[in-house]
Amino acid sequence: PLNNGSIDSTNWEELTGHKIFGLGTIYGVGSFNDPNGNETILVATNSGLYGSSNGGFFSIPIPTGEAFTEDVEFVQAFHEVLVFRGFNKRPLILRDMVEGLVYVDQRETDTSLEENESDGTSAIPNAKTGIFYQNRMLIPVESGDEVIVSDFLNPTRYQNILSEFRINTGTSD
């Protein structure tokens, strides 16, 4: 119920059957759909990362010493969620709700596929956002007119030079 324009949560659980959790400042909200069709809502706050699924609410571990202090973007790629935190911070990846977030590293790629090279790759760069499309991650870089494209079936790494694309800034598009 409203009380002078604010929510009075004194008897909220009695009224709705649900508890209210104070999350602090929210920096991003996203979702994760597992292969079984279960959805988990992810919330990045100044006090940590939280998940809500099937009526439950739980904390998800983040790397020691890390905190969310600015906007984040969640992007699901296959059975993982990438967390982009801006151009000054390494992206994080959520592979397991119990293990929690870890820094993105170069995971091995299936080099038997013609699209993937066996060397000369780098971990994806720091970024504000990304788009998962056609089994690849597309990530705009800080310059504003370049996009990197990840290896096929591996959103964590890309091949330098051959997977960096500059978008024409001229008027003859």
Image: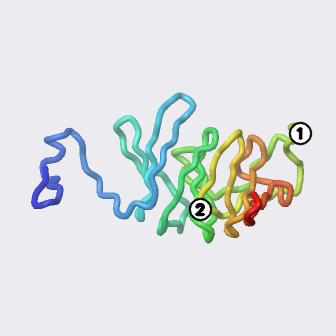
Q: Which sits in the foreground, 110 or 97?
A: 110
Q: Is residue 21 left or right of residue 30?
A: left
Res. 114 mark: 1
Q: Is residue 16 left or right of residue 116?
A: left
Under mark 2, the amino acid is Lys
Q: Secondary structure at mark 1?
A: loop
Q: Residue at x 73, y 62 (%)?
A: 146
- Mark 2 sits on what residue? 128
The quadrant in which the C terminus is found is bottom right
Q: Residue at x 72, y 45 (%)?
A: 136
From the top left corner, tell me how far across and down residue 15 is, in percent. Answer: 14, 41
Res. 76 mark: none
* Disc nearer the start of the sequence (1/2): 1
Under mark 1, the amino acid is Glu
Looking at the image, the residue that sits furthest to the top is 36
What is the image's colouring? rainbow
Q: Residues within 10 Å of mark 1 (few under 14, many from 20)?
A: few
